[in-house]
Amino acid sequence: MPDKLIKYLKSLYSSTSIQKTLKTLSSSYLYFLTLQKIIQMQEKKDQSGPYNLLIETSSSCNARCLMCPHSKMTRKKQIMDKLTFQKIITRLKSENPPINKVILSGFGEPFLDPNFLDRLERIKSLGYPVRFYTNASLLTKKNAQKLIDLRLDELNISFNGTNPVQYKKIMGLNYAQTVKNINQLLKLKKEANSILPKVQISSIIIKENEKSIQKHLKTWQQKADSATVSLAHEWGGIIKSNSKKKFEKAKRTYPCRSLWHTLVIDSQGSFVICCRDYESKFKLANIKTHSFKKAANHPTRLTWQKLHLKYQKQSLPLICQNCNFPYQDGIEWLLPRSID
Ligand code: SF4
C-alpha cells in the first residue's frame, strides 16, 4: 500500500471525530453482521500469517511515564542476553517464519541495550522491515546516523509532553534534549536525502497535556512523517486515565486481530500472548526450546482466538476483557497488513 495512503489512513484514524463515527457505526447491527462475515473469511487466511514479531531487547527504561504500566511491572527489568538473541536469529534463519515486520520493542527503551544497533543490523540483514519505539532521549547523532545508514524502516517516538515542565512531569526526561535529538535526526535524514526511517511522533492525551496537545500535534505533523495522538490505554484496569478524553465502553466489541497478527518475545526469550501483557503473565513457550510454529499454534493462543471469535470475552482474562484500544470497532479487520 502506498506510503501516502497509509499516512492518510493513520491520521484519519487518530482523529476524534472519525473515532466517534466508527464507534456509532460499530454499535449498529448491520455493521456487526457485515463485519462478522468479513472476520470469518479473514480469520482463516490469517491463521497462516504473516504476523508482526515483537522482540523486547530491553525491558529496562529510563523514562517514568505516568500512563505506562512499566512502574507497576514486577518481572525482571533487563537487557536480553546474547544467547537468547542469537537463538532468535538462528531460528529466524532456519525456520523462515511468516513475518510481516519485526518490531524491536517491548516495555523498555531500546537504546539502553549497548548492543541494540548491532542487533538491529542483524535483523535488517535478514531482510525484514523493522520498526522500533523509543523516547528519543538517547538518540545521539551517532545513533541517528546509524539508523539512516541501516535504512531502518520506521521509528516511532513516544513524545508525551508539550513543554519542559510538563514533559518532565509526564515522562521524567529532559524536553530540550529530546527535541534536539529529534530535530537532529530529521536534519541528518534530509542531508542524506533519505526517506528512511519514517519518523512517527506518538503522543497520548492525559490531563497534564490535554490543553496543549493539538498545537504539539500540528507542530510535529509539519516536521515528521506523521504525528498522532491517542487516548490513554488502561492496561486491564491497572492505570486509570485522568483525562476527560478517555475510551468509552463500546456497545459491541469485536475479535482482537492482534491475536492472529502478533507474536511477542520478551527480554527473557518467552513467547508472550500479547504486547499488552506487560507482566509476561501469559507465556506460550520460549525461543530457547520452542519453534515459531509451536508458539503460533500454542493451545492458549488458539483458545483465546476462539473465545474472541465467539464473542466470549467474559471467559477471557481481565487483560482482554478490559482492553480498550483499539479493538472496540473491529476496524483492523478491514485494513491491510501493511498498515500495522
Ligand atoms: S484484546 Fe487487548 S489484551 Fe486481548 S489480545 Fe487483544 S490487545 Fe491483547
Image (tube, grey):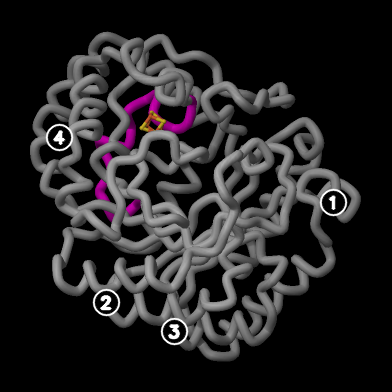
Instruction: Tell me if residue 338 is in the magenta stretch.
Output: yes
Relative to 340, say whether 128 is above or below: below
- Sequence-wise, the earlier of marks 3 and 2 is 2
Name the amino acid type tagged 2.
Gly
Give the magenta part as a residue range. Answer: 324-340
Q: Disc 4 on helix, strand or loop?
A: helix
Give the camera-side residue of 162 and 225: 162
Ligand 1 within 8 A of label 4's CB?
no
Q: Which mark is residue 168?
A: 1
Name the amino acid type tagged 4.
Glu
Give the camera-side residue of 95 and 84: 84
Q: Residues within 10 Å of mark 3 (few under 14, many from 20)?
A: some
- What residue lies at 24% left-to-right and 34% top-to-bottom? 301
Name the amino acid type tagged 3.
Leu
Q: CA distance from mark 2 to mark 1?
A: 38 Å
Q: Residues within 10 Å of mark 2 (few under 14, many from 20)?
A: few
Q: Disc 1 on helix, strand or loop?
A: helix
Q: Which mark is residue 127?
A: 2
